[in-house]
Image (cartoon, coloured by chain):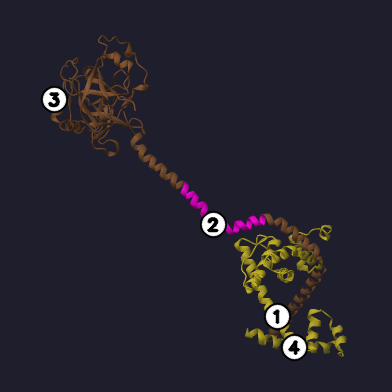
Chain colours: A yellow, B brown
Amino acid sequence: MKESRRPVLTDDELLAGLATGSDDVLNQLYRRYFPMVLHFVTSNSGSEDDAKDIYQETIVVLYEKAQSGTLELHCQLKTYLYSVGRRLWLKQLTQRNRFMVRDIETPAADDFAGQQIDADLTEHEERDRQFDLMADSLDRLGEPCRTLLEDFYIRHLSMQAITDKFGYTNPDNAKTQKYKCLMRLKRLFFSEYKQS
Amino acid sequence: METNDEKDIEGTLRAYGERVRLQQKLTAIHSKLDMDAVREEVGLYQAEAQQSGQIRSLWRTYRTTLAVAASVAVITTFGSIFLYRSYQQGHRQQEQQYSLLSKEIQAVKSSQRKLLSDLNGRGRALSVNPAQVSGSGFMLTADGYMVTNNHIIRDADSVYVQSPTGEVYKARVVHADQTYDLAFLQLCDDSAFRALTPVPYSFDAHQSDLGERVYTLGYPREEIVYGEGYLSSGTGYRGDSTAYQVAIGVNPGNSGGPLLDEKGNVIGIISGKQTTSEGVSFAVKTNYLLKALNNIPVDSLKGLPLRLNRKNTLARLPRKLQIKRMQAYVYQVKVFKHKD
């Protein structure tokens, strides 16, 4: 019931908020449509955990599209989320060899919106594959390179903080080290990426 | 390539970082969710969606079946209606579209003819017991052979003819020809009948031309009625080659009346009309009248030969005079049938 106290944002406002990376908007969006996806997944032989995974992946798809500024909505935001979540869950079900689906909402019905979502998901899968590979490469990179790169690129620590943390004499040194690590990661990454 | 890859890897790494951070954020948000409240909301959702959802899912599952059932129902319904209609029409066309022009007299109010004094009481019998069917007929010979339509005298118990002057004679059916819808009557059985002067018209068996001006006399009412028109087709109802189509106003009761051309030749016998269109009447051709005459068994004539008049005395007369001469030979035919 917290939602009712906050101003209810429209689809456009939500999307604008996502594009700027507002945590508050993300929070609100997450809360607003989670019950829908939870209901869908649980009424189609999924658990609450399945629902959480599917929903988070759905939000990731939307968020990344919004951030890159390439999101084109041809239906309501709710329908978009439902359709994406539905497809992701269907894929899971297919992998588990179950096909019957009981809808609780109308998925995006017209061809254009459907194709758009297809394209979005294909893009998303490609990115997923990249990220899996990246996680794998980072794993194989070994310490201290992995932590160094994660600190810089994922946790957004400053060069100075990293210099202090790893005990380098100066930031330039840290930079050189980071560069070397990056080169190694690159080799690891592309040896796999280009093969596939 | 080298620098490209370098940028690529950095970009991918950054994006990967974003993804990881987002996932962490989402997990954080999720962990802060009050799952009980969410479940409650799902419960509400479910209850709300249940009814419509159930119907909707039933609809989704069975809509193809429903569609097939519905179309079968529609096709069956309209198919049977159509079949029934066409069957009915097939019947009606013969029964109704072609209406025989005999008249059911029962419905007709007793006429002023009742008032005519009738010394020998012959008319009285008729007025007490009005005929069930009436039509017209006309003399073939002066000695009492008449022709009328078969459909008028069909199933008759007794046949009477009434002259324009109101005299009633009993008639004998000499021969009934179903194929051409013709019937021959003889009055000479009746002792009251006195032979007339020779008939003034002749019979023209040749095919008449379209547009020929024609006229008829008949008894759609108790009085003789004149009607005129023109020959509109060389064939009758549904291409019946034994009849003409005539554009002439005829009514029930006109059946059996003569159809004459301008010169006073009998070219046909009025037999029916098409109910679906106005002014479309039919008349049996004289040619077939002659054919039917030849089919009469000699025994039926009882030794009185039936010789048609060949001399036309009407040809030069104006129409009014023709009619005046003519009408004495056109009789009303009254038919009595036992009631079933």
Local SS, label 1 = helix
Local SS, label 4 = helix
Of circles 2 and 3, the one toward us is 3
Q: Chain of mark 3?
A: B
- What is the distance, in whole Å, between disc 1 and disc 4 at their CAs? 14 Å
x then y, percent, for residue A184: 73, 89
Residue to which mark 3 is pinned: B302
Q: Is disc 1 in the same subunit as disc 3?
A: no
- What is the distance, in whole Å, between disc 2 and disc 1 at their CAs? 46 Å
Do the CB atoms of the residues marked 2 and 1 lie less than 8 Å apart? no
Q: Residue at x 29, y 36 (%)?
A: B237
Q: Chain of mark 4?
A: A
Local SS, label 2 = helix
Q: Residues within 10 Å of mark 4 (few under 14, many from 20)?
A: some
Residue to which mark 2 is pinned: B65
Of circles 3 and 4, the one toward us is 3
x then y, percent, for residue A131: 71, 79
Question: Residue A32 sits in which quadrant?
Answer: bottom right
Residue to which mark 1 is pinned: A132
Choose between B79 and B206: the one closer to the eye.
B79
Q: Amino acid at mark 3?
A: Lys
Query: Does residue A191 show up?
Result: yes
Q: Chain of mark 1?
A: A
Q: Residues within 10 Å of mark 2 (few under 14, many from 20)?
A: few
